[in-house]
Amino acid sequence: MSRTRAPGAGRKIEILVHPCMALLDQLGPQTILRILGCDIYLVAKTLDPVSTDVGISVTPDITFEHCPKDLDVLFVPSGLMGSLVAMEDQQTLSFLADRGASAKYVTNVCTGGLVLAAAGLLNGYRATAHWGVADLLSLMGAVHETGRIVHDRNRLTGGGVTAGLDLA
């Protein structure tokens, strides 16, 4: 009797860990993708624990420097305050631009779309983000489209926080 591989077996998924990120945005998709058998990389600048929006810390398991370059999915969660900080962090934006250039899929949920846009990864792509900030996408090179999930070529962007579950 042969064993069937899980649908996501061997797929490399990067989830950006940044201060004040929405824990649900990270944990929801991570849970679904792990069930599918994906290899999850919680990546940040350092391996120091990072406090989330609800005060629960997440400990990254890999740094920008050591994260694989051949990712299947680059994923950026939200957290308004954390997204604003990440948008101004050149090291984070450089990492995202580098891995996003070769990832099979570039994805975000909620305000994570602003971070992808700041890294130049949504230029000319239809995209969405949390309704409260989605208008800013067009100012940053994206083509704002209303929707819970917007799929344009290899970009998948999600609206509000629970859209991360649907996105995964």
Image (tube, rainbow, N blue to C red):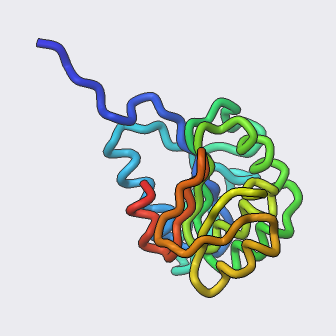
- Residue at 59% x, 46% y is 153
- Residue at 60% x, 73% y is 129
Residue furthest left in the image = 1
Residue furthest top in the image = 1
Classify residue 113 by image quadrant: bottom right
Give the number of callouts: 0
- Residue at 65% x, 30% y is 70
State whether residue 126 is above or below residue 46: below
Q: Position of residue 115 (x, y in %)?
A: 73, 65
State whether residue 16 is above or below residue 11: below
Q: Nearer the viewer, residue 4 or 16?
A: 4
Q: Position of residue 114 (x, y in %)?
A: 72, 70
Q: Nearer the viewer, residue 57 or 117?
A: 117
- Residue at 30% x, 32% y is 6
Residue furthest bottom in the image = 132
Left or right of 63 in this view: 42:
left
State whether residue 51 is above or below residue 3: below
Classify residue 131 by image quadrant: bottom right
Quadrant in which the C terminus appears: bottom left
Q: Nearer the viewer, residue 87 or 50?
A: 87
Q: Position of residue 166 (x, y in %)?
A: 39, 62
Left or right of 42 in this view: 94:
right
Quadrant in which the N terminus appears: top left
Q: Nearer the viewer, residue 103 or 77?
A: 103
Q: Position of residue 142 (x, y in %)?
A: 74, 64
State whether residue 97 is above or below residue 57: above
